[in-house]
Amino acid sequence: MQQYRAVVKNQMLPLLGEVTLGDATTPLLDRTLKVLAETKNSRARILRQVLVGTLGLAVRHGVLKTNAASNTATVLTPKKQIEDYSVAEVRELLAHLRAVTAEGSLLEQQACQVVHVMAGTGLRVGEALGLSWDGVNLDADIPYVVVSRTVVTGTSTGTRLQDVPKTESSHRHLPIPDFVVTALRAANAAGLDGGEFGLVFPAVTGGKVRQPNGLRAKLKDLTLGTPFEKHATHIFRKSVATHVAREVGLTQASSLLGHNETGTTVKHYVRPEHEAPDVRTALEKLNGDTPN
């Protein structure tokens, strides 16, 4: 909703605010979107979504007979190469964070703990900061966390805890590896006030929601001068997805990340392999002169 409002204010009204519904033709809207896409591709893509929804509402109320925005060309997003850390790089980064925060402040130690949780679960940074102790069981036969909330940042509402994750499928029960258990036990031992929701990673001032951007800034400080300083927190999610897909399978990776379908996982999170599998034995059977 914050993105839609921003696009309406900054793109839709300046570009189309004086256009009546009757004059909002497909050619006009299509040209407007293409011009905007040349400099602000993501804004153009969202604007098209807003226009389709807006004119669709007008059609449903009988103001328009057809939705002119529906026939505009889809705004294509340039495909970016999926960046992820190798297993060795993840190990190096986690070891680095443990070393530089061992005697550090609560804020630094918490950043280290959050990264360990993300690296061992594939959680989004907002989901990690939205974890509550009532959804964590470290003493079960198979320790787990429950993802049921996320931290979001809005331009008018500030940083807040959203009582639902990103999508319905994002609500999930995740078994966690031993190094995540260790990180969560360290977070518990810190004794920070988790507020009314019992947050695992609250602001160190106590009881307030931890800001994702503040965590990113602290992580950048902790990795300054290393190969990891330029990468965003979302790379952990991609690294987990790629590793799990390789080791266990794409379906399991998709489920871990909370995706409705594997297509999303493949398109945005799993780095493609460019080396084909060795299927020479199967291919040899195509040659009639070769015995079975």
Image: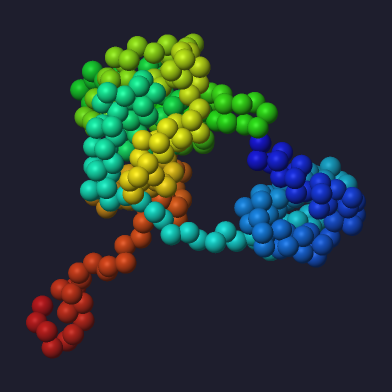
Up-down relation of residue 96 to residue 44 (above or below): above
195 left or right of 65 in image: left
Say which residue appears at 70% left-offset and 41% top-offset.
Answer: 6
149 left or right of 50 in image: left
33 left or right of 108 in image: right
* Residue 123 seen in render: no
On the image, the x and y values in percent for residue 128 come to: 41, 29
Q: Extreme front residue here? A: 225
Q: Nearer the viewer, residue 96 or 180?
A: 96
Q: Quadrant of residue 223?
A: top left
Q: Quadrant of residue 134?
A: top left
On the image, the x and y values in percent for residue 23 come to: 89, 57
On the image, the x and y values in percent for residue 66 come to: 81, 55
Say which residue appears at 45% left-offset and 52% top-offset.
Answer: 268
Q: Nearer the viewer, residue 199 or 227?
A: 227
68 left or right of 38 in image: right
Say which residue appears at 33% left-offset and 46% top-offset.
Answer: 226
* Residue 94 seen in render: yes
The quadrant in which the C terminus is found is bottom left
